[in-house]
Image (cartoon, helix red, strand yellow):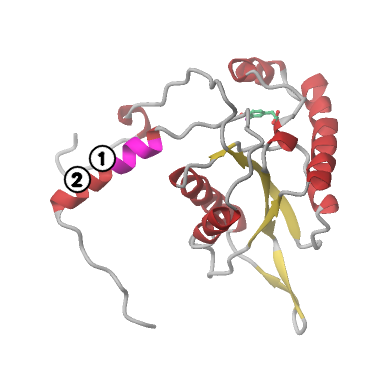
Amino acid sequence: MVPLDFSRLSPEAMEVISQKMLSRYQSRRTVRHFSEDPLPIAVVERCILAAGTAPSGAHKQPWHFCLITDSVIKNKIRFAAEKEEFQNYHGRMSERWMEDLKPFDTDHIKPHLEDAPALIAVFRQAWQPDEVQGKKQNYYVQESVGIACGMLLAALHECGISALTHTPSPMGFLGEILERPTEEKAYLLIPIGYPADGCKVPDIKRKPLSQIQKKYDSKGT
Ligand code: IYR
């Protein structure tokens, strides 16, 4: 154990910082149309390092981030994702699901998998190989990797990079194309880049505090 490095902010500073923080977060939008302009890769790598600061079960850090800028690999991923998504949009998804997706104007054709200057394929490590024990267990893998992905999206946004959280399903093809070891399972595929000129996004509203929070204080309000 080592001493914690922490200094309290004043209530005034907390007020100002939290207001700025919220307006930054409120401006984040999922982007589906990307400019092909390249990104500063050192910036993206810092965002991946930021994601790697996430808490994880027993500090196993059960994540791996594949950063793909190679156009041949992007093309392979697009081809494989479209094959799966064709099945999804033509029978695998329920009528209700298709109806819920309508406002987002999605279909099985995924040009962003090639247009975006980079793709981040996130893998979860179900276990870790160990010479003595064979398989060493990881804990709370879904939770840990989910938190890391949330931190990645926030870090990218903070650095002026847009992202799409894409969940091609099933995504076994990612492990095959990227030649990942068997203990790793694909978790999310995140195209990143600058928005294309004239990029439009759905006119969504976010739930107000009253719908996402219930307070349990001593006044019972
Ligand atoms: N995975 C499909 C369908 C899809 C699902 C959800 I939930 C979305 O928010 C958007 C799309 C696809 O990526 O097209």
Secondary-structure class at tag 1: helix
Mark 2 sits on what residue? 15
- Alpha carbon separation for disc pair 1 and 2: 6 Å
Residue 188 visible at all = no
**What amino acid type is highlighted by mark number 2?**
Glu
Q: Which of 120 and 103 is in front in this view?
A: 120
From which residue to which does the magenta span run?
Answer: 19-25
Residue 127 figure quarter: bottom right
Question: Which residue is located at x 61 percent, y 41 percent?
Answer: 192
Position of 160 compared to 163: left or right? left
Secondary-structure class at tag 2: helix
Give the image location of residue 217, x and y in percent: 20, 43
Residue 151 visible at all = yes
Give the image location of residue 68, x and y in percent: 72, 50
Q: Are marks 1 and 2 in contact (CB under 8 Å)?
A: yes
Q: Which of 142 and 15 is in front in this view?
A: 15
Question: Which residue is located at x 26 percent, y 40 percent?
Answer: 19
Q: Is 144 part of what is drawn in magenta?
A: no
**As displayed, is residue 32 above or below residue 96?**
below
Mark 2, Cα crowd under 10 Å, few <14 / some 14-19 / many 20+, is few
Position of 145 compared to 111: left or right? left
**What amino acid type is highlighted by mark number 1?**
Gln
Mark 1 sits on what residue? 19
Question: Which residue is located at x 60 percent, y 46 percent?
Answer: 39
